[in-house]
Every structure is written in C-alpha cells, then in structure tokens.
Amino acid sequence: MQHLRWRLAALSTTLILIMLAVLIQRPSLLSASDDGQIIQTLPLIVELLVPTATRTPTPVNLGNFVWDDLDQDGRQDAGEPGMSGITVQLWNPAKTQLIGQTTTGANGQYTLIAPLPGSYRIRVVLPSVLDNFSPKDQAGGSDTADSDVNPSGSNIGFTDIINIASNVISISNLDAGIARFRTPTPTRTPTPINLGNYVWDDLDQDGRQDAGEPGYAGITVQLWNSAKTLMIASTVTSPTGNYTLIAPTPGNYRIRVVLPSVLDQFAPKNQAGGDDTADSDVNASGNDLGFTDTISLASNVISISNIDIGIVRFRTPTPTRTPTPINIGNFVWDDLDQDGRQDAGEPGIAGITVQLWNSAKTLMISSTVTNATGAYTVVAPLPGSYRIRVVLPAMLDQFAPKDQAGGNDTQDSDVNPSGNNLGFTDIINIASNVISISNIDIGIARYRTPTPTRTPTPINIGNFVWRDTDGDGRQDTNEVGISGVTVQLWNSAKTLMIASTVTNANGAYTVVAPLPGSYRIRVILPATSASFAPKDQAGGRDTQDSDINPTGNNAGFTDIINIASNVISISNVDAGIRQNNIIVPISTIGILPQPSATPGNQLPPPQINPCGGFRLTSPLDGLPNGVATFYWDPSISAGVTYEIRILNEARSLLAIVPAGTNTNVVIDVSQGTIGGGFTLIVQANVLLNGAIICTDEHAILRAALAAFQSEIAVVGARRALPLHNNFR
C-alpha cells in the first residue's frame, strides 16, 4: 500500500510539471475560444510522458562475516580471525537458482545484493573437503555472534530461509563459522605419557609393599588397549624392579604383567588402605587376571607413577630351608549300616585312592592309597586352601552321608556324597601354624555282589502304569494299562540307575532292588506331549493312586522308597499318564490285540511296534575323554529320526545332538567341551514328528578320564602344569 501511495504522488507531480511546460511554450492556449481544446490535448501528452527513469527500486544488502572458528564452538570469540576468499552465494529458497555470488574480503566480510524483497538463502562454499561448518545458533540468542549456516543434513552449507519485507534495505547478521582441518606439523609432536612404576616380591602375600620386600628384576610388563585386544608396548623391569612404558597419546589403556612361573601368583589388589603408592594394582583373578583396571589418561597428563604389582613367588623347598609339611589324614571305612558314623565293627578299607587337590578342583597336588587298616596320609606342601578327594572303588559304591556324628569330627564322614563337589571334601583352610590335620575321614557304602553262600533275597518293586483318561490321578475301572513304557530303578540321590524294564501288555512292571536300602522309581514318558497324573489323589489308598511326582526337581521320579531288610516285595508303586492318542512302544516286535470285526465294518490295520529292535549298542563299556562315535540298532518304523542326549550325574542336560536318519553320530564328550563328571548318562531316542517315542538310556563311565587321573597323579606330585589345561 505504501508503495502504491508513492507512485500516485509521483504521478501527480509529473502531471503538474507537464501542464506548466505546455502553458509556457504555447501561451495561445490560454486565449483560445474553445476551452475544450486544452482539455482534449492534455490527456494525450500525459499518456506519453508518465514512464520515467527515476523509478529504480532500492536493492537489499545481505552480509556479514565468515570466520575461522578455532575452538569449533560456533561462537565468534576474541582472536578468531575472518577468512578471506571464501565463496558466498545468494540462492532462491528452493535451492534451484543461483542469484548472486561474491567472495569474502581480507577481514572475512562479504555483501550480496537481493534485487527485490522476497525469500532467499545464503550458501557458503567450504575451502577444503576436510573442513567443516561450525555448530549453528550457539551464541545464546545473540545473532551477531553465532554461525547461521547448517553444518549437516539436507541443507548443509545453506542458511535457513531468509524472508525480506518491502521496507528492509539491509541485513548484516548472516555469519558463518568454519572449523578448518589443520595438518599436524613437525613442531606439534604430542608429549608422550610415561606409565610406571614397580614390581616387587610380596613375601608375606598381603598385597602391601613392606620394608624388606625387594623389587623383582626381569619381569615382562606390557601396555594394552582397554579392550585387551592390542598390545601397544612391552618392557622388562630393571634390577630394582622399576619399569616405564610410554602411551603414545591420551586415551584408555591397561597394564599387563606376565608371571615368571606358572606356579607364581599375583598379590591381592588394593590392600594398602587407599594408599595407591603402596598397594598392588593388577587383578589377581577373574577375567582380567594379570591386567590392571582401565587407566584413563586425560590430555593434560604427562606421567603416572603409581602402577605397582606384587607377585607371590612359589619357592621350591631347598635343603637349607625345608618347609614343614602339613600331614592330612586319616581314615576310610566301610560304613556297613550307611549311617555316616564310624560304628564299632565297621572296618577300614585298604587300597582306596585318596588325592589332595587345590580348592578350585583344577590341580591335583598329590595322591596316595589307604593302608591295610584304611588309614592314609597326604602331604600339603604349604599352608593354604585344599580339598581331599576319594575315588570310589566301584561304580555301584556310594559315599556315606556327611557330618552325621553330631558334631564329633573324628567319627563322621567328610566327603560330599552328591552334588557338584561329589567325592570332594569342602575347602580345608590350613593356617601357617598348622603341621597336621587328622580328622578327615570318609565312609563308603559298598555295593556287595551276592555270592552263592549268601544269596540275598531280591526285593521286587512294581506295579502298574495306566492311561489316566480323566486326569484325576485315580485308577478308574475303565482306565487301561499302557504297554512298552520304560520304568527304571535309581538310587535315592538320582545319580545312579540300577535297573530298567518296560511295562508288559497290561501295563504291569517289575524291577528288582539288589539289597535293602533307599531307592526311587523313575518312569519315562512315552511321548513329549504326555504328562504325569496328579500324585496321591486316591484318599490314602496307595493301590489306587499315582506315585510319580508330576513336576518339580523330582519330576518323573517317586519320592524316596526305603526298603527294610525284612521286605521282599513292594507292589503299590503305580504311575498314571495323561495323553490323547498315546503312541506306545512295546517290548517285542509283534501285532497288538485287534478288535473284532462287526457286520459291515472292516478290521483296522494292525498296530506294529514302533521301537522294534531299537537299542544303543556302542559305546557301553566306557567313554573317552574326547570324541566318541555312538551306534544304535534302528527302529522298524518309517519316517523316524534319532538323537543322542548327554546328561550329567545330577541329570542336568549337557548336550542334544540330532542324528537325522543315521544310525550313528560322532560327539565330543570331553570334559572341557560338555562338562560333567566321571559318569555320563547317555539317552538314545527315536523321534516321530519331533516327539520321542522310544528311549534307551545308559549310565556310562568316562573311562579315559578315570585312567588319565591315575596318570596325572605322578605329574601332580612333581608339580607339573595345572590339570585344567589338559581338559581344554
């Protein structure tokens, strides 16, 4: 509107000037008789003379400054100079048309001219591909001290859209900061960071640098990155135990120290009450064994001199300084009544292997056998933490219950009879003032093979596995037995399977316990979709209920069954199984009983035993501590596949190895690969559509491992490399 008013005013002025000029040049017009002539002539003159050269629009100047942002903070700081020769361009807002271009002057100033009011963008061209734009709008709202060019994104190098109104004649706050890439020069060599200081012989093993504890010469000390994937530098300690490593730049590092002997150890870490010049800084155990924690070096650090390492040296006894050995004993006996107490008349057992191990169970230190009276002695070379291990004389033997003598440690058994520490004592801590321990005793509950002169009466255990159609845990009159279901007899600890059978055509079974004692019955579900019926649901009538635990740690097992010496049979151990359309293998190949034909109906096809002659054939007499090939006779069923499952003595699953349709498979059963102890439980399974329909299970001794233990007893006595290195 203002622009229109200006044009009207200019037009009025022009008209007045034209009229005056005409009257001066042609005065006769004033005396003409026909006034209408003047009125008719003037519009023609006005129409021809209105456009004039005095209507040029005022340009809009845009600027102002391109500077070298030395600290790259996006603010124009004192001492940060302008940059000359930088190309600055004016573009339309869509970035499709270049309107104008200039370069900055000696002080970094520039000016571009927008021809008319409207919308534009300023673009700045970086002087080098290695340069970057400063961060935008970082001056706390002061638009005269920030950078206005976008440093990244789709508008990199451009400002946001600049809208210029008709009354604006200049904008002088469009600045651009450039973070220039500067090539390092020989005069800008970074100062190296020295790291040290000291490796010492921690004689009293307390992790503190005490008076009289000497430095350790010739120890390899290394500088690593913090991830422990790259060694950067290495050195050895001086005759006084000092060392220096050089970190090339600030950053994150670790120091690593290499023990001079596999028998040496690192001193405890951070034991000087916060005094970092008197402690040891290397991790003595765990994933970072031998390394310090991460050391972060800031840019203003030039040296660190408190990284010290204590080493606990293993000292071989010499004739002039023989350490007093610690004798550990005492007695291995035959626990006839299996109560864990040394009773009168219970004899010692001769020839039992007794071993001394470190507390972590990774190194056997010495080995002996019991004498004729069952006594033994093993020698611990130094004070420290140890365990005693006893090797059972036979697979069917067991350890007596532990700590059953009412706190009298001279009358009980000290070896764990089950669990992860089976066959080992708990940790025995020997102080420096102890010279002997004589109360480490071990009771063994021996399995006695019947002899012709003393044939024990076998104990028959049964009775019935049935299909619990309504799932109520009670044997109803219309519910039938299931044939071909595997039923096993186990010891009470679930570490040893003693006998196995399958149910007959009526679902009945019998397993034989060789002696009175404590046992469990285990039932193998015939398919993965099957489940056990609820337990003890017949109102106390034990001949009508199910006795198998359906869930929990004892799933598939009964509770412990205690058989007294006067019992010859138990016939009420039943198991209910719930499943629709159970596929049930039978013990012999044949045709199941067929229903009679009815008029107009054909007989259904015969049901063939899916297991047939399936059984695991090898290896059954022992496993190597390495690779073994498992063989089995195939099932007669079509469309089945096979698998091998490996479990430990506690029945925890170690491995599942599918074999497809093959009748053999190779598996690495070494302790270092799958774990487990001296006995592994091997299950060979037949699968139909992914469900197990047949199982053949065996507890097999890892024979090669047992033999290897005998060999390393000699090596352990000579203090060879740790045993666990050989299990990898």
Image (tube, rainbow, N blue to C red):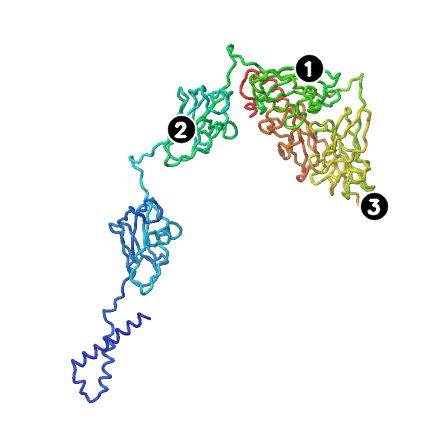
**Location of residue 553 with respect to 309 vertically, above or below:** below
Q: Is residue 263 above or below residue 587?
A: above
Of the residues under marks 3 and 2, which one precedes in the sequence? 2
Q: Quadrant of residue 495?
A: top right
CB-based contact (under 8 Å), mark 1 and mark 2: no
The mark lying in front, picked from 1 and 2, is 2
User: How many angstroms separate mark 3 from mark 1 (CA)?
Assistant: 75 Å
> Is residue 522 or residue 500 the one in the foreground?
522
Q: Where is residue 339 shown, x and y percent of the image?
A: 73, 23
Q: Residues within 10 Å of mark 1 (few under 14, many from 20)?
A: many
**If the image is split into quadrants, where does the C terminus sit?**
top right
> Which residue is more in the foreground, 538 or 237?
237
| SS assignment at label 2 | strand
Per the image, the residue denoted by label 1 is 374
In the image, residue 244 lies at what x, y percent?
39, 26
The amino acid pointed to by label 3 is Thr
In three-dimensional space, the C-alpha distance between marks 3 and 2, rounded to whole angstroms, equals: 99 Å
Give neighbour class at mark 2: few <14, some 14-19, many 20+ (Cα, 10 Å).
some
- Which image quadrant for residue 643? top right
Q: Position of residue 171 (x, y in %)?
A: 31, 58
Q: Is residue 176 left or right of residue 251?
A: left
Q: Confirm or deny contact between disc 3 and disc 1 (CB under 8 A).
A: no
Residues packed near mark 3 inside 10 Å, few (<14), some (14 to 19) or many (20 plus): few
Q: Is residue 659 visible?
A: yes
Any mark on residue 598, and which?
A: 3
Residue type of the residue flagged with mark 2: Ser
